[in-house]
Image (spheres, rainbow, N blue to C red):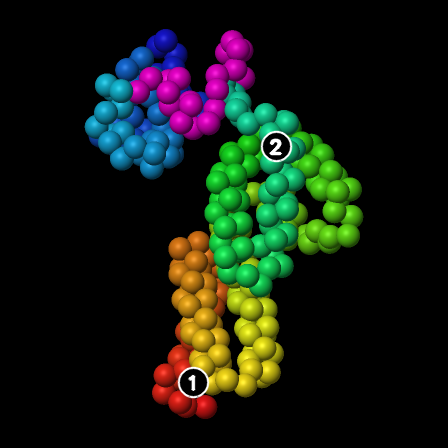
């Protein structure tokens, strides 16, 4: 097991002065050790990892946490492979595409939130699996299956890109754009309907609803869309609309 000491137990990166965690951290109870990057990933899962790694963690546990498993023997291969099977990539790939499409097209803030929550649980596995050589061909099967099931739905390049080259920044930007489109569609619908409302009370109720949704979209954007280049601009836009509606509702302006 001495060999394991020279490479990271999680990702097989050679452990050097630059890749080792600081202050002798990341040692495991079976003689293994993890690199800085894996250390950071595991510390996200257990903040006490730095303190407890040598007492509570061995290589197998580390690999489970990192969602990987040891390949049979082969010494000089990468030593690790994705735990995420081809079948799962294909089936869940379709679910990912379905969710992306709904997020991109809905005008309902509850729908966009719940779909993103669902997608956000699946997505990290795709980011991890995408380093595997086989990934693209598995994804291609999912894409083909999606296209034959939903031949009437157009799959945009940027939607496809989220699956073909998954990254959390890309997802965050996509979600930010989608939240704005969702809010825009919702607003247009509300404005149209408000025009036809007669009772002041009913109109006020609609204004209140818009304010609630503006707050919801704004908080989603803050939590999950801040990687977008247009994040500040979007927050500003929502804030402006919210203020306008707030004044109409409570200050009888406009
Ligand atoms: Zn590592």
> Is the residue 245 above or below the residue 45 in the image?
below
| Structural crowding at the residue carrying mark 2, measured as other residues with C-alpha within 10 Å and reported as few (<14), some (14–19) or many (≥20) | many
* Location of the C terminus (image quadrant): bottom left
Q: Position of residue 136 (x, y in %)?
A: 66, 35
Tag 2 residue: 89
Residue at image point 69% right, 32% down:
137
What range is drawn magenta here?
57-77
Mark 2 residue element: helix
135 and 6: which is toward the camera: 135
* Location of the N terminus (image quadrant): top left
Residue at image point 36% right, 83% down:
250
Residue at image point 69% right, 54% down:
156
> Is the residue 222 above or below the residue 138 in the image?
below
Q: Is residue 123 visible?
A: yes
> Is the residue 206 above or below the residue 106 in the image?
below
Residue at image point 53% right, 55% down:
112
Mark 1 residue element: helix
Q: Position of residue 9 (x, y in %)?
A: 39, 21
| Label disc, if present, on residue 210 of the rendered structure | none
Mark 2 CB near ligand 1 (8 Å cut): no
171 and 219: which is toward the camera: 219
Q: Position of residue 65 (x, y in %)?
A: 40, 27
Q: Position of residue 145 (x, y in %)?
A: 73, 38
Q: Nearer the viewer, mark 2 or mark 1?
A: 1
| Structural crowding at the residue carrying mark 1, measured as other residues with C-alpha within 10 Å and reported as few (<14), some (14–19) or many (≥20) | some
Q: Is residue 52 magenta?
A: no
Question: Quick check: 55 left or right of 143?
Answer: left
> Is the residue 230 above or below the residue 121 in the image?
below
| Residue 192 placement: quadrant | bottom right
| Mark closer to the chain start, 2 or 1 | 2
Tag 1 residue: 248
């Amino acid at each position: 097991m001495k060999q394991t000491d020279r490479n990271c137990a999680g990702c097989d990166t050679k452990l050097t002065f630059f890749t080792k965690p600081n202050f002798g951290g990341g040692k495991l109870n079976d003689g293994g050790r993890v690199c800085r990057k894996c250390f950071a990933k595991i510390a996200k899962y257990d903040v006490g990892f730095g303190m407890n790694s040598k007492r509570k963690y061995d290589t197998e546990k580390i690999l489970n946490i990192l969602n990987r498993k040891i390949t049979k023997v082969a010494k000089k291969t990468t030593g690790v492979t994705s735990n995420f099977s081809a079948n799962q990539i294909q089936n869940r790939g379709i679910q990912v595409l379905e969710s992306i499409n709904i997020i991109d097209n809905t005008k309902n803030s509850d729908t966009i939130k719940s779909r993103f929550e669902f997608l956000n649980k699946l997505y990290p596995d795709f980011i991890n699996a995408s380093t595997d050589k086989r990934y693209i061909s598995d994804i291609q099967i999912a894409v083909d299956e999606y296209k034959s099931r939903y031949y009437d739905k157009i799959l945009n390049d940027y939607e496809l890109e989220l699956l073909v080259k998954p990254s959390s920044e890309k997802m965050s930007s996509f979600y930010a754009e989608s939240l704005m489109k969702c809010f825009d569609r919702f607003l247009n619908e509300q404005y149209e309907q408000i025009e036809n409302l007669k009772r002041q009370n009913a109109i006020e109720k609609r204004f209140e609803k818009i304010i609630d949704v503006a707050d919801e979209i704004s908080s989603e954007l803050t939590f999950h869309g801040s990687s977008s280049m247009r994040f500040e601009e979007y927050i500003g836009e929502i804030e402006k609309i919210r203020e306008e509606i707030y004044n109409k509702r409570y200050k009888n302006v406009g």
